[in-house]
Amino acid sequence: MASVRLHEVSKRYAPDLPPTIDRVSLEVAHGEFFILLGPSGCGKSTLLRSVAGLEEISAGEVLIGDRRVDGLPPRERDIAMVFQSYALYPHMSVRENLAFGLRMRNTPRAEIERRVCEVAPILGLEELLDRRPRQLSGGQRQRVALGRAIVREPAVFLLDEPLSNLDAKLRGSMRVELKRLHQRLGATMIYVTHDQVEAMTLGDRIAILQGGRLQQVGAPLEVYARPANVFVAKFIGSPPMNVLPARREGELGLRLGEGRWELPPALAAARPPGAPVQVGVRPEDLRLGAAGSGLPARVAVVEPLGAETLVTLDSEAGPLVARTGPEARPRPGDPVGLAAPPEALHLFDADDGVRLAPTPAPMLVGESPA
């Protein structure tokens, strides 16, 4: 296995077009499960294909281990790629599909048999080795595609939305299988997805892209708890974070239309009274109270999901979604007052949407830094 480093990588398809990838720098550690996440058209698949050598970069460097590879063809980069489509040969058995890449590299027959026999039990393919792809389910076909990559024993695995063709239930079970597979192999994996549930559950770290630019890199829960900007805040989480326009008021206050919330002192100090801001609050941190308190709102839609209930609300400041317990029974049209704990609020710049960090408390005389 090996690390992967990207330094100021850009990709532009034509001089008069904006870059598909714009000066992206990343480092993927040895053995890390690293996620490239973003909406369609953000450049994540292009970035993965640039690592694979299927796209020629316009600027920058790509290194696998200590070797610069951006000038090398794909077969010389020691990578294996799994695509959204299974790309299995329909006239070949599972055994032949697994062995095909090794045969093309003139691997000795005994070594091919050894690797196939090692990989088949890992993916539960022992009983399927003599079947053709048409005799397999979607999940089984995807396991064969993964197996074909594993037998190569590459330095890096590259996976481009490999679960997107599966139904929701099968995607869930395949996520678990992929997690177990990574833990067993200890392999370096770079995984592209637009599904933030996949990103949160699979990744050691996530890189979020938008418009070809890197927005934030971090551990899943770190990105969820401290989004770098409004785009990340709204993209990570299901339902996403509520973000509303607001204005600082008084020492700790925050004015949202006709409503008022309070900020913790350190966060309130990030902008002076009267300054416009954007305030964010996760649906699980929003509290439904009696009408006339907090932020006035009216219940629009109630979605009971068993273990939780999602409540969509309309307010003068904008629409919001609250996640409540199953015991909550609001009805469409009910007036409510919305509150949020001060420590659960996030502040973003009113213009560029960048996160506003709390101002550290002044150090007392004689106090040593932590």
Image (spheres, rainbow, N blue to C red):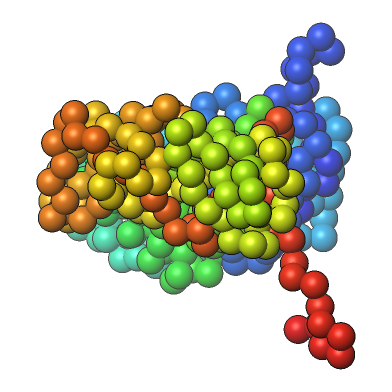
When the figure is inspected, residue 109 is found, relative to residue 22, above or below; the finding is below
When the figure is inspected, residue 113 is found, relative to residue 210, above or below; the finding is below
Q: Residue at x 76, y 23 (%)?
A: 19
- Residue 17 lies in what quarter of the image? top right
Judge from the rendering whether residue 265 lies leftward or rightward of residue 148; answer left or right. right
Point out the image quarter for the N terminus: bottom right
Q: Position of residue 316 (x, y in %)?
A: 42, 27
Q: Residue at x 27, y 60 (%)?
A: 124
Would residue 209 be visible to someone looking at this image? no
When the figure is inspected, residue 23 is found, relative to residue 306, above or below; the finding is above
Judge from the rendering whether residue 106 lies leftward or rightward of residue 200; answer left or right. right
Point out the image quarter for the C terminus: bottom right
Camera-side residue: 40 or 354? 354
Q: Position of residue 179 (x, y in %)?
A: 40, 62
Camera-side residue: 244 or 27? 244
Q: Position of residue 204 (x, y in %)?
A: 54, 62
When the figure is inspected, residue 341 is found, relative to residue 11, above or below; the finding is below
